[in-house]
Every structure is written in C-alpha cells, then in structure tokens.
Amino acid sequence: MSSALLAAQQLVVGYQKPITAPISFQLHAGEVLGLLGPNGSGKSSLIAAITGTARIFSGQLHKAPGIELSHQRQRPVRLKEMPIQGRELLQLCAADKLPLPARLKPFLDQRLDKLSGGQLQFLQTWACMGSGADVILLDEPTNNLDPEGIDSLADSLKHLAPNQAVLLVSHEQNFIDKVCSQVVEVSKNA
C-alpha cells in the first residue's frame, strides 16, 4: 500500500449514513482504475470522500504524502455568463503546457458560456488531465460527449504522464474496457 498513490481498505463512505459496501483498491502511477456499479451504489460518493466532501464511516483511505488531486465532477457547474475563453481556463488550471488534442483547438478562442455541453465537458476534463496532478478523479467524463469525443478522451487517457493515475466513474462499459487497467465493482451498503 505504501507505493500506491491512493489506496482504500474496506472503505465505507456516505453522508448522513453509509452508502457503499466496503471497498478496497490500490491505484499506482500509470494506472487507470474504473469504478463500476449501479446508480446509487456510491461511486460518486467514493470520489467525494477522496476529496474530503463525503464522510468515511469505516475502513482506511491512504493518500501518498504530497499528492495533488484534480477532480472533474459528474455535473460541472455551468455559469450563465462565463466571459473567459477555453485558452484562459487551461491557463488557470496550468493545463496549457502539454500538446492539446486536435478536438480542443476549436474551443480555445471561444467563451465557455458559448460552448455546447459536450464541448465544455471535454475542455474541463482535459483541464483536469493536463493540470499535472498526480491523481485525476473523473466522474462520468463521457457525459454529453459524442462518439468522436469519447474516442478522443480514450486516446488522451492512454497518453498520461508516467507519474499520473486516474480514478474514473463511467456507465459506458466499452469505454471502461478500452481505457482501464483495472476495474472495481462498487455496491450499495445493505
């Protein structure tokens, strides 16, 4: 467990009461771990516990000392007026240093409030992935993406820096199969 960037041992999380059954996993640099399970089983709650916004009821969560997390929410906040451009978002997230996927280039000079849901989703997901964080938490990153966007995201996940790892939630079985080096089943607390 000491070499893992993130590790859970019999972890049970929730808010007012436990949601997940005990879950265990280890996430090492270079890995993409997928969380699968039915709606309401606590996959997003597990990510929230990792970020400190949900409660840990039992078990252990270990984060390697000094790791930096980057989190793409399932439903990112979308402001009615967002007068910054895609390029500025990437600069704010320090995600403008790596070569960008071709799919992103048309969004760089557009205001965020003018992008479609899928365009904004892809841009924000790339902002997390390109930020240089050690562990990237992606909650339903394929939401609103068309098939080309899903393929582009899958390709981007294959080209992470060797020191990075990804923990992702997705209902897209084909996507999970394509990008994940390991899959963990999340089930609801009985």
Image: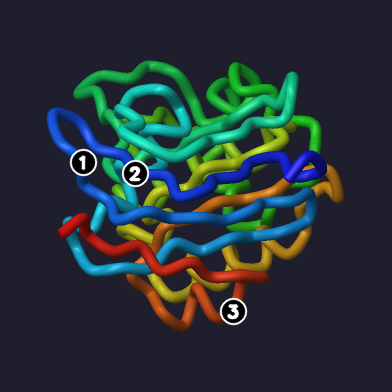
Quarter holding the C terminus is: bottom left
Q: Is residue 164 above or below residue 153?
A: above
**Residue under the point 64% across and 41% down:** 6
Q: Are marks 2 and 1 in contact (CB under 8 Å)?
A: yes
- The disc labelled 3 sits on which kind of residue? Lys
Q: Secondary structure at mark 1?
A: loop
Image color mode: rainbow
- Rendered location of residue 14, percent (x, y): 24, 37
Left or right of residue 35: residue 183: right
- The disc labelled 2 sits on which kind of residue? Val
Q: Which residue is mark 2?
A: 12
Q: Which residue is mark 1?
A: 18
Left or right of residue 57: residue 166: right
**Residue under the point 37% across and 16% down:** 83
Q: Secondary structure at mark 3?
A: helix
What is the C-alpha distance between the residues marked 2 and 1? 6 Å
**Residue under the point 73% across and 64% down:** 158
Disc ID at residue 178: 3
The first of marks 2 and 1 along the sequence is: 2
Quadrant of residue 8 within the rendered picture: top right
Q: Is residue 125 above or below residue 36?
A: above
Count the numbered circles shown. 3
Q: Secondary structure at mark 2?
A: strand
Quarter holding the N terminus is: top right
Disc ID at residue 45: none
- Rendered location of residue 151, percent (x, y): 56, 72
- Rendered location of residue 122, percent (x, y): 48, 50
Is 120 in front, or is 61? Answer: 61
The first of marks 2 and 3 along the sequence is: 2
- Rendered location of residue 21, percent (x, y): 29, 56
